[in-house]
Image (cartoon, rainbow, N blue to C red):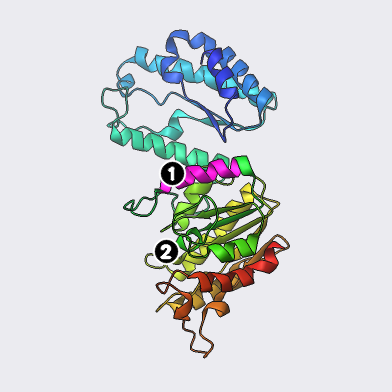
Amino acid sequence: MEPAIFDLMSEVKSQLYIIDCMPNMYPSHDSIYARTINGVAKLRAKSNTPILLVENDGYMYGTTNRAIENECTVTNVELRRAYDKLIADSVKGLYYLSKEEIGITPDAQVDGWHPSDLGMTEYANAYVNKINDILGRNVLPIFEPCSQRREPHNYEWRERHEAVVKRNATENPEVLMIGNSITHFWGGYPEHRTQNGKKSWKKLFGKKSVTNMGFGWDRIENVVWRIYHGELDNCSPKHIFMMIGTNNLEKNSNEEIVSGIIELSKLIRSHQPETKLHIVKIFPRKDQEERIASLNTLLEETLIKDELTDIVDCTSALLKNDGSGKIDESLFSDGLHPNEKGYDRISTIFSPYVK
């Protein structure tokens, strides 16, 4: 808790600052109060970013050694005293994680001090619960955020994520296109060697600045991870198009997928409250036309539309004209991914939304 550390932290733009130093503060426990007060003041002078103060999680052998137990107690008492003072002074965005909330169990430390794998899991779970409460990230329990990586024969997922974050922060695009491989392989930037709809992309967007946030094989949970890790930060797009869920068909029910899409739209809205959000119905795909039609109907009935949120439906442009409800395979390369002709049909549907 050296003052210089708070100086450095205040220079870093973050979504949350966490101060978790109590286990090493016993030798200088009489400085905890002042360092906490002054450190929080330095952070608050630069931003309103939430700040989380974390207690010492405790020493298991403190149950039989009163001196060791006292080392934990005195640090936490001083931290709590500083926290109470800051709250009394009306400092906003300040949070607290107590020893009891961390809840390290008796057999979760390797030496009575440092957590084992079990202890770190308990510690991590306490952090997750608290961070979810602070940042409002507990809305998608079915779709736990996660990254993904397939065999790198096509692209590197993490590299694309970093490219998107950089582009959005530096270019501030007018339009963001969130999706899976169907969006990924359409066209635009970050550029990818597979661009099956390059002509229609240019026709649709012209000179507009657009980021293609489509990631091959992505599911709802992967998009959640990407948003949590900065893809919608530091930019102010006019339009966001989001089509996701076709890769969830194998493991999730229609009800779960629709719930995920709706909660994901709320997450997007929390990051971009003034942007026009266009939820694109899942495109029909070979041999799953009927299920996707039912899913899209449920989405249409469940999603709350308003002046900033609407639904884009490309279904009719991708089906045969014979009323069979089957896809027009001449518009697809493999029954799932549109070809140039298919993307041209899609761009016609998208066009009124970006004028």
Q: State the residue at coordinates (35%, 15%).
A: 68
Neighbourhood count class around disc 1 (C-alpha, 10 Å): few under 14, some 14–19, many 20 upward = few
Under circle 1, the secondary element is helix
Quarter assignment of residue 88: top right
Q: Which residue is mark 2?
A: 247
- Decide which of 162, 98 is in the foreground and name it: 162
Q: In x, y percent, where is residue 115?
A: 32, 28
Prevailing secondary structure of the magenta residues: helix
Residue at point 73% right, 62% down?
307
- Quarter-of-image position of residue 38: top right
**Is the residue 1 above or below the residue 186 in the image?**
above
What's the magenta region?
A: 157-169
Q: Is 7 displayed left or right of 216 in the figure?
A: right
Q: Nearer the viewer, mark 1 or mark 2?
A: 1
Q: Is residue 175 located in the magenta-colored stretch of the structure?
A: no
Cα distance between the residues tagged 1 and 2: 21 Å
- Is residue 233 visible in this depiction of the protein? no
Vertical relation: 131 (above or below) 144: above
Label ID, residue 159: 1
Q: Position of residue 51 (x, y in %)?
A: 58, 29
From this view, report whether residue 233 is shown above or below residue 213.
above
Lateral position of residue 83 relative to residue 154, left or right = right
- Amino acid at dot 1: Glu
Residue 315 at least partly seen: yes
Q: Earlier in the sequence, mark 1 or mark 2?
A: 1
Pick whichever, 29 or 174, lies toward us: 174
Badge 2 crowding class, 10 Å Cα cut-off, few under 14, some 14 to 19, many 20 or more, is some
Q: Whole-percent x and y of residue 151?
A: 31, 52
Residue shown at the point (51%, 16%) measured from the top left: 1
